[in-house]
């Protein structure tokens, strides 16, 4: 039926339009896989105890196996309205947003508009001669620019001058490429430089080019009023309803909102980008290259990588507070590690009221998205995802 419809409606249509239609038809025809009783039981037994132990109002899970999605929804998107969670509920992705920024930067790289060897002053002349200008685009994209902190200072003005003052006067704790310090300012500068290289607002590039190209039509950097009905409320540690605010570079670092339905499409595109526009396909593959070794984890652009098969302990260590809160020594991979299907790619994310985890293994054609409207421990997310992925592989 889908093939017949595609052949019927595409007669006489241009190649670019044909490509967009093919993507839309493929999404339409990608019907959910039948959920086996065993898989349902496994997900139930892993997710329901997490909700109880950490008082999580709602969790949405999506998995993909051989290009087919399946969805599991639990609890409510809002305690006040009791609206149930489903695959279309919008959650804050937290730092999973960084993978979209990395895709946008890689999009600039494959077009030759940005280079990983560029220094900030090429795009921001006022930073010429500053200590941070010794770092490159690669360093900012891999948190190795010299020890930028996790967050901007609370009193930093949310404007270009405030950003320039901060970066211009920052005193690195190490030289570029010496330590990895997980950092919103670092990744924010990475996204900012990519936007300047593209001569466009990064949010607009994502919303008008990259997200539609991925078949993601319910993922937002700037939330429209029409989507608010699907936007879950997050709950902080006092169980108060919260949603994120806006600050400098928030859109690049933690500000994307999406659903499991859209996010599993994103995972599928990362597992097999061959159906995408050629430029976007190359951009996706570019985010799978590894540049720095940090313990058992390889840092790429956005995604963090582990040789597969991987032990749960290794994943837990790579997603620990030690890795996210402290400066860790790194080893530059020369040459860079090529994208490999035999890799576990993952990213965690959180805001004050939401928690997320995404992982996939291209060689096995399996992936998982777990979104929740409470920031519960990463260790619990990784453990649950690992067990579910083992079930998918069997």
Image: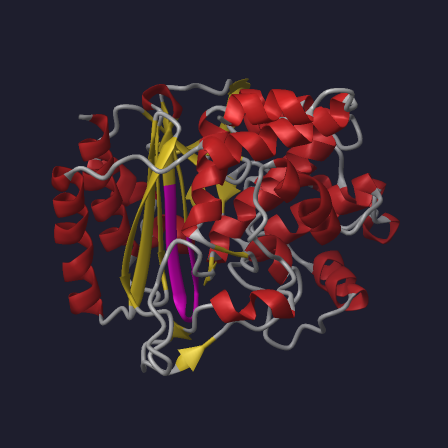
Which residue is drawn at the image coordinates 67% and 46% (left, top)? 206
On the image, the x and y values in percent for residue 93 come to 47, 56
- Left or right placement of residue 181 versus residue 364 in this view: right
Instruction: Give the answer, above or below, for where 3 lies relative to 137.
Output: above
Magenta residue span: 349-358
Q: Is residue 34 or residue 48 the one in the foreground?
A: 34
Tell me, yes or no, whether the highlighted magenta stretch contains residue 356.
yes
Tell me, yes or no, whether the highlighted magenta stretch contains residue 304.
no
Question: How many circles with numbers are drawn on the protein?
Answer: 0
Q: Could you say which quadrant of the image residue 253 lies in?
A: bottom right
Which residue is drawn at the image coordinates 53% and 51% (left, top)? 97
Which residue is drawn at the image coordinates 18% and 33% (left, top)? 391
Q: Is residue 175 or residue 279 the one in the foreground?
A: 279
Which residue is drawn at the image coordinates 37% and 49% (left, top)? 357
Instruction: Give the answer, above or below, for where 227 lies relative to 22.
Output: below
Q: State whether residue 175 appears in this view.
A: no
On the image, the x and y values in percent for residue 16 come to 75, 26
Q: Is residue 149 or residue 272 the one in the foreground?
A: 272
Q: State whether residue 233 appears in this view.
A: yes
**Which secondary structure dominates the residues rendered in magenta?**
strand
Instruction: Give the answer, above or below, for where 116 lies relative to 226.
Output: above
On the image, the x and y values in percent for residue 298 come to 42, 31
- Left or right placement of residue 284 versus residue 43 in this view: right
Q: Could you say which quadrant of the image residue 17 lies in?
A: top right
On the image, the x and y values in percent for residue 323 come to 38, 48
């Amino acid at each position: 039926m889908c093939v017949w419809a595609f052949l019927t409606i595409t007669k006489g249509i241009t190649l670019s339009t044909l490509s967009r239609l093919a993507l839309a038809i493929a999404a339409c025809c990608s019907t959910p896989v039948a959920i086996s009783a065993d898989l349902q039981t496994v997900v139930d037994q892993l997710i329901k105890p997490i909700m109880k132990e950490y008082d999580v109002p709602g969790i949405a899970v999506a998995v993909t196996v051989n290009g087919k999605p399946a969805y599991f929804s639990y609890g409510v998107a809002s305690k006040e309205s009791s609206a149930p969670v489903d695959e279309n509920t919008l959650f804050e992705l937290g730092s999973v947003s960084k993978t979209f920024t990395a895709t946008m930067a890689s999009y600039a790289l494959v077009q030759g508009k940005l280079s990983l060897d560029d220094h900030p002053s090429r795009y921001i002349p006022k930073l010429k001669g500053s200590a941070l200008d010794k770092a490159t685009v690669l360093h900012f994209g891999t948190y190795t620019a010299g020890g930028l902190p996790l967050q901007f200072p609370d009193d930093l003005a949310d404007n270009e001058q405030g950003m320039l003052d901060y970066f211009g006067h920052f005193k690195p704790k190490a030289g570029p490429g010496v330590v990895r310090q997980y950092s919103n300012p670092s990744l924010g500068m990475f996204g900012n430089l990519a936007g300047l290289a593209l001569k466009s607002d990064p949010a607009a590039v994502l919303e008008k080019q990259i997200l539609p190209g991925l078949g993601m039509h319910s993922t937002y950097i700037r939330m429209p009023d029409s989507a608010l009905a699907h936007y879950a409320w997050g709950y902080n540690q006092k169980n108060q309803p919260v949603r994120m605010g806006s600050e400098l570079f928030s859109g690049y670092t933690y500000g994307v909102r999406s659903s499991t339905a859209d996010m599993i499409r994103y995972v599928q595109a990362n597992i097999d980008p061959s159906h995408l526009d050629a430029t976007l396909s190359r951009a996706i593959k570019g985010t799978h290259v590894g540049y720095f070794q940090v313990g058992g984890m390889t840092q790429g652009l956005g995604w963090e990588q582990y040789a597969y098969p991987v032990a749960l302990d290794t994943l837990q260590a790579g997603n620990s507070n030690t890795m996210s809160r402290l400066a860790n020594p790194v080893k530059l991979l020369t040459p860079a590690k090529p994208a490999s299907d035999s890799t576990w790619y993952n990213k965690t994310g959180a805001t004050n009221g939401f928690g997320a985890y995404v992982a996939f293994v291209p060689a096995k054609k399996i992936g998982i998205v777990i979104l929740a409207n409470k920031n519960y421990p990463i260790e619990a997310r990784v453990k649950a995802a690992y067990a579910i992925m083992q079930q998918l592989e069997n």
